[in-house]
Amino acid sequence: MKPIVESTSPLMKPSLILFYGFSASLLLVIADYFAGPFIQFPISYLLPVALVAWFHGRRWGLIFAVVLPLVRFYFSAVLWTVPWTLADAGINAVIRIVVLSSFATVIDRTAIQSRTMSKQMSLLEGLLPICSHCKKIRDENNNWQELEKYIHDRSGATFTHGICPECMKEYWGDIAPR
């Protein structure tokens, strides 16, 4: 499955993000095991769930949101001697799954909105060198491009062409509709 976010930073490559999520989850599960049944810090599960949901989407976020509480449930049911019932541990696991799944969904939606806004806000800022005669724009490589192509390449805008009333009068005054 192709990751949602592409990054140019070597530390933020999508495959490494997934590795970071797995690593953080493994460390949290180990810490959870050694902390025992009475010290609970399920809020720490938010970090790997958020990490993979942001960079790899809702599906991965939900996988982490389900697996982490189930591991803790396994500890309570099989490995630890606990004073509460299996039903209590199961209810706690379901609550954690619901909360972490909701969190993964919110993180995924926020990431999608953030990427959408980022795409919509394509940068056309600063001073643009433009030819005063033909209206071509000089790009960062000192190449001259038509205004429409330059703007389209950087913003995704498309152009339609028409003639304003002043130009119609000036250039086609004798055949222009009155």
Image: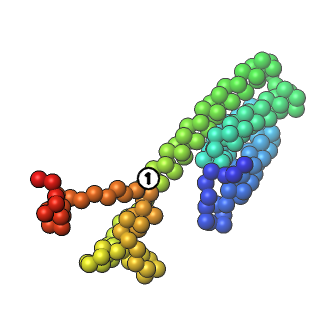
Where on the picture, by quarter, is residue 13?
bottom right
Which residue lies most toward the front here?
Answer: 175
Q: Residue at x 75, y 19 (%)?
A: 88
Question: Can residue 39 be seen at all in this image of the molecule?
Answer: no
Q: Along the line of sight, which residue is nearer the eye, 45 or 62? A: 62
Where in the figure is residue 24, as x and y percent of width and height? 72, 49
Where in the figure is residue 140, as x and y percent of width and height? 44, 77
Q: Along the line of sight, which residue is nearer the eye, 49 or 83? A: 49
Q: So how many labels did they put on this image?
A: 1
The residue tagged 1 is 120
Q: Residue at x 34, y 56 (%)?
A: 160
**For residue 80, above or below residue 114:** above
Q: Residue at x 64, y 34 (%)?
A: 100
Where on the picture, by quarter, is residue 173?
bottom left
Which residue lies most toward the left here?
Answer: 178
Name the colour scheme: rainbow
Where in the figure is residue 132, as x and y percent of width and height? 26, 78
Q: Amino acid at mark 1?
A: Gln
Residue 30 placement, left or right of 47: right
Q: Along the line of sight, which residue is nearer the eye, 161 or 155? A: 161
**For residue 50, above or below residue 165:** above
Q: Along the line of sight, which residue is nearer the eye, 22 or 30? A: 22
Question: Can residue 132 be seen at all in this image of the molecule?
Answer: yes
Where on the picture, by quarter, is residue 166?
bottom left
Residue 104 placement, left or right of 90: left
**Mark 1 crowd level (few <14, some 14–19, many ≥20, 10 Å Cα):** few
Residue 106 placement, left or right of 122: right
Which residue lies most toward the bottom here?
Answer: 142
Q: Residue at x 55, y 37 (%)?
A: 106
**For residue 146, above or below residue 158:** below
Q: Secondary structure at mark 1?
A: helix
